[in-house]
Image: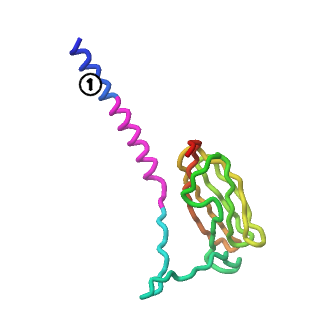
Amino acid sequence: MFKELILAIALGALLGFGITGGYLAVKKNQLSTTPITAASPTPVLPGSGTPVPTSSTPADANSSPNQIHLDSPENESIISSSQITIKGTTNPGSSVIISTPVDTYYATADNSGNFTSNVEIENGINLIQVDSIDLNDNQATTQINITYSTAKF
């Protein structure tokens, strides 16, 4: 009986490690195909340590390159709903393409450059990519990570 118990524990451990290793290998492969962007450093005035003020105003339709700024949701947000509203600004009249793990959504910026789109995300971490193509065919891309969780904090 003792031999059978040791054999059952050993086989269970091997099977468990095999399944876990396979799962981690698949997840690693999925993560390695996802592009990762780093935040750009804030410029600082030499010798003062004071950050250089920057403007978040969208560019004119005639300027290049195209710019895109997301107002909501914030990057790295944790939300409790699978439906979210993406709001932002870009060049006026630009086509906006929003890609989530669930689907791809399309919007058009108004004359002020504002756009809004309701999108659906899946449970867990969601990489959302927002692309903007202006009337001069200039493209801008930004990405945010949003976590959908129903856990109570």
Coloring applied to the structure: rainbow
Q: Position of residue 141 (x, y in %)?
A: 58, 65
Give left or right: position of 103 versus 37: right
Give left or right: position of 152 versus 50: right
Give the image quarter of residue 20.
top left
For the image shown, how many numbered marks are present on the structure? 1
* Residue positioned most to the top: 1
| Residue nearest the observer in this picture, 3 or 31 | 3
Give the image quarter of residue 122.
top right
Q: Amino acid at mark 1?
A: Ala
| Residue nearest the observer in this picture, 58 or 72 | 72
9 to 40, vertically: above or below: above
**In terms of secondary structure, where does tag 1 sit?**
helix
Question: Which residue is identified by label 1?
Answer: 10
Q: Position of residue 103 (x, y in %)?
A: 64, 48
- Picture quarter with the N terminus: top left
| Residue nearest the observer in this picture, 7 or 27 | 7
109 to 15, vertically: above or below: below
Magenta region: 16-36
Give the image quarter of residue 21.
top left
